[in-house]
Structures are given as structure tokens and as C-alpha cells.
Amino acid sequence: MNYQAELDKTIKNLKDKPKLLLHACCGPCSSYVMEYLASIFDITILYYNPNIYPKEEYERRLQELKDFLPRFSPAVENKIKLVEMNYDPEEFYGAIKVREEPSMADDPEKGERCRRCYEFRLRKSYGYAAENKFDYFCTTLSISPFKDSVKINTEGEKIASENPEGPKWLYSDFKKKSGFLRSLEISEEYGLYRQQYCGCVYSTRTAVPD
């Protein structure tokens, strides 16, 4: 499936400004997505990332996002809101089943461990979206070249299909249309902290050196 084409089609057929719950992992990944969608959707950002290690890194990414929103005109002009959910790393370890399957610790990026992580964060996002009557839910994760957009969209579609009356999954591949490059430009313009690894303790092994 061409996820960008699906997103374009959805946007073209909108008749109002629907409510979108946008799961986000950090400010830099959110930047381009907000710029792109803020005038089209009524956006609430959901920061739910118990996978991030250590807690200091989690808090740094969250604070960067909080500081960025009131400085970023698309967020200010369109009144983008931010919701933080609980930080409990045990939820992440339970979701990826690393204790039952120790081999998950050595699973490569974009593999099964990451798929399980996508699924569990998207299920939490869907639950919040359904409870608060959002029209759509989505995630910024697909903007990263280190993330598998097929797995992300497959999980989102599967979760939404389990309850056709609930929020719809918004297909996306935010790397397209030079989205990742634009996020780099915005990050440089605003002096955003860009982390050097995905987030979990296992991804620190593939951290990009400064």
C-alpha cells in the first residue's frame, strides 16, 4: 500500500477538521508532522513512551516537546494540546516479552521486538482516542528511517479494524515528501535536542556517536 497516497486521499475527502490523537516520541519527530497536519486536524499529542531508557532520557524528550510547542507557530495557531501518560518501563518489558523470550534483547532494529513495541503503544493510543471520542489516531514514528512504516501501519489498521465504530487509523509514512529532512531543518532552526538512539535500552547499542 502507498501510505502517502492513502493519507492524501483521506485529507482530500475531509469535510471538517476532525480530532486526531497523534502519538509522539519526541519533539523533532513531531515537528514536521505538526507543520503538515495542524491546519487539517484538531491535534492532541499523546506522549506515551515507557520504552524510553533511562528515565532521565524520557524526561528530557518530554520537556523538549513541552518547550517546543509554545514556540512553534503551527502548534500555537492551531492550539495543539499535549497529554502525558504514565511512565512504567515494566509495561514495555511485558509487551515485548523479553523475559519469556530473552532473544528479543538481541532482535535487530525494525524486527519483531520493534513490532511488539509499536503495537503496544498504538493500542494504548487507541484506548485513549476511543475513550475521548477522537475521529482518528496515528503516530509520528513513521518519520524515522529507523522505523518500519509497513509494520506501523499494519498494526494501526489491525487495532482500528477490531472496533469499526471507534477512531479510524490514519495511514501515513511521514518520511515521504522529504518529511525526515524537513524535521532536521526545523530541529536546527529551533535548536531542538535530537537523541542519538531510538529510545529503549536495546537501541542504545546502535546509538549514533556525536
Image (cartoon, rainbow, N blue to C red):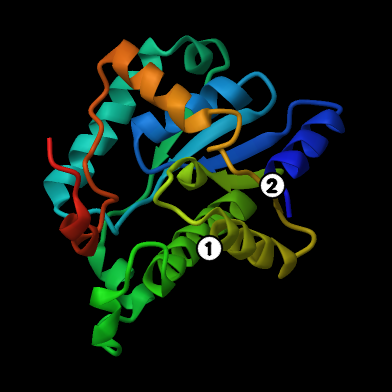
Q: Secondary structure at mark 1?
A: helix
Q: Which quadrant holds residue 98?
A: bottom left
Quadrant of the frame with the N terminus:
bottom right
Q: Residue at x 39, y 18 (%)?
A: 185
Q: Secondary structure at mark 2?
A: helix
Q: Using the image as rendered, state which of residue 49 and residue 201 is in the foreground.
A: 201
Q: Residues within 10 Å of mark 1 (few under 14, many from 20)?
A: some
Q: Is residue 36 visible?
A: yes
Q: Relative to 141, is 92 on the left or the right?
A: left
Instruction: Kindly report the distance in space between the C-alpha atoms of the residues bearing marks 1 and 2.
Output: 20 Å
Circle 2: residue type: Tyr
Tell me which numbered mark, 1 or 2, is placed earlier along the sequence: 2
Residue 3 - label: 2
Q: Is residue 170 visible?
A: no
Q: From the viewer's perspective, is the residue at label 1 or at label 2 nearer?
A: 2
Quadrant of the frame with the C terminus:
top left
Residue 85 - label: none
Position of residue 90 relative to residue 194, above or below, is below
Q: Position of residue 107 (x, y in %)?
A: 31, 74
Q: Position of residue 24 (x, y in %)?
A: 43, 41
Q: Residue at x 51, y 46 (%)?
A: 142
Which residue does the numbered mark 1 point to in the structure image?
123
